Image (tube, grey):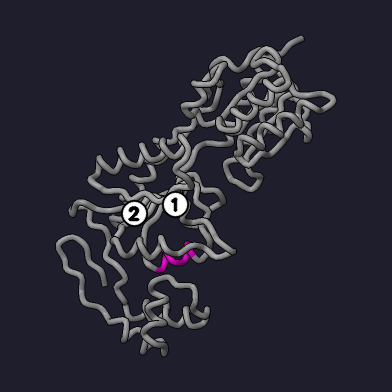
């Protein structure tokens, strides 16, 4: 068994003993311990049961009294100001608690239908005590690998609904969609469109649900043709805005579910010779730096990215010390940041 603090780590059975107990070779047992996928399911089951039955020590728990500790941050990309805000939050929180952070980008993606495993092996090799995943889409085998190796992890703004028991931190996306739509309704708009991200993403579907809820509460008819998806891509958002403008009755306002996509919307409106907000009002989501730089400055929904990242780091530290959060889902509130891109509709 593993003991933390001043107690020592008792010597457990060797991998050879585990292999003999499971009736497999030592290399096969090693593959299971290291999360390799080239093992038959039945063989994996026998080895895993032997590991648990014999109390094989995979790795010690994080001891907060020992510094410096090491954690990994796996981000979707390093090319956006979104990632910069997340990095800032994690770095500041890690500095406060005496941790060091290793940052990797895009390592949970798949190639040819198979998940990349190199980062998992490196995780063990460098002795990381926990992992933060930002906008990561983990596979069932990756979740299983982390659980098998007893590595604590927290998801920051997960793409899909996490499995039961997985700890995550995100923003109040549904309420953000409500707030954005209510703002446009308060200005007198009724023909309000939404350009969302991916249909299957948690944050995107929640924002669209909030939009629809606000319309329903105001007694405004929901128009299916006003709902477009652009995958959080600026170029696709440009095309979707042009499609909306080509409708027989185009919208007078649009809620764009990311500031990055709002840049594409601005470009589409400029192509058609339309002015923001004189001809059409625009609300974004995120409150990234570019929302203040474009002209006119973008009214948007602020989600506290750095605070989300810092909160996830503090939850991870608790888990590394053996504590378990009372709730697996933490949501931070969003708020409207009103600037110059919204106004009353033309009569």
Instruction: Kindly identify the residue that appears in the image at 70 percent across and 17 percent down.
Output: 274
**Dot 2, crowdedness within 10 Å: few (<14), some or many (≥20)?**
many
Give the vertical position of 135 relative to 9 (above or below): above
Residue 345 image position (x, y, % from top left): 71, 13
Residues packed near mark 1 inside 10 Å, few (<14), some (14 to 19) or many (20 plus): many
Which residue sits furthest front? 271
Q: Check if mark 2's residue and mark 1's residue have beta carbons within 8 Å.
A: yes
Image position of 312 (left or right of 293) = left
Q: Quadrant of the N terminus?
A: bottom left
Query: In the rendered image of this protein, does residue 100 appear above or below residue 7?
Result: above
Residue 323 percent location from the top left of the image: 32, 54
Q: Is residue 68 visible?
A: yes
Nearest to the observer: residue 64 or residue 134: 134
Q: Give the residue at the far right of this rendering.
A: 248
Circle 2: element type: helix
Is 5 above or below relative to 177?
A: below
- On the image, the x and y values in percent for residue 135 come to 50, 47
- Quadrant where the C terminus is found in the figure: top right
For the residue pair 90 and 279, the one nearer the viewer reads as 279
Residue marked by disc 2: 319
Please tell me whether residue 143 belongs to the stretch shown in magenta: yes
Mark 2 or 1, nearer chain start: 1
Secondary structure predominantly adopted by residues drawn in magenta: helix
Q: Which residue is mark 1?
A: 167
Q: Quadrant of residue 8?
A: bottom left
**Start and end of the magenta stretch?**
142-148
Picture coordinates of residue 311 (x, y %)?
37, 41
């Amino acid at each position: 068994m593993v003991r933390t603090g001043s107690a020592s780590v008792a010597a457990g059975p060797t991998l050879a003993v585990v292999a003999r107990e499971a009736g497999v070779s030592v290399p096969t047992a090693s593959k299971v311990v290291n999360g390799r996928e080239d093992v038959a399911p039945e063989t994996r089951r026998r080895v895993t049961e032997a590991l648990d039955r014999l109390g094989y020590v995979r790795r010690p728990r994080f001891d907060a009294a020992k510094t410096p500790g090491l954690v990994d941050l796996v981000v979707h990309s390093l090319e956006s100001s979104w990632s910069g805000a997340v990095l800032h939050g994690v770095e500041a929180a890690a500095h406060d608690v005496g941790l060091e952070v290793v940052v990797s980008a895009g390592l949970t993606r798949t190639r040819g239908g198979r998940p990349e495993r190199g980062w998992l092996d490196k995780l063990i090799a460098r002795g990381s005590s926990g992992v933060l995943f930002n906008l990561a889409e983990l596979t069932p085998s990756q979740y299983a690998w982390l659980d098998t190796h007893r590595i604590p992890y927290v998801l920051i703004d997960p793409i899909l609904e996490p499995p039961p028991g997985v700890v995550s931190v995100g923003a109040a996306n549904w309420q953000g969609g409500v707030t954005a739509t209510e703002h446009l309704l308060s200005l007198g708009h009724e023909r309000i469109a939404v350009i969302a991200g991916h249909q299957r993403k948690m944050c995107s579907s929640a924002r669209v649900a909030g939009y629809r809820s606000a319309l329903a509460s105001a007694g405004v008819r929901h128009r299916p043709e006003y709902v477009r998806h652009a995958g959080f891509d600026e170029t696709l958002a440009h095309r979707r805005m042009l499609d909306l403008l080509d409708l027989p009755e185009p919208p007078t306002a649009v809620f764009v579910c990311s500031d990055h996509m709002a840049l594409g919307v601005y470009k589409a409106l400029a192509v058609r010779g339309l002015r923001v907000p004189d001809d059409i009002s625009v609300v974004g989501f995120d409150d990234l730096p570019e929302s203040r730089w474009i002209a006119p400055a973008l009214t948007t929904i602020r989600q506290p990215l750095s605070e989300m990242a810092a909160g996830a780091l503090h939850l991870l530290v608790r888990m590394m010390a053996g504590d378990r959060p009372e709730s697996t889902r933490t949501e931070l509130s969003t708020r409207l940041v009103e600037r110059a891109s919204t106004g009353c509709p033309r009569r």
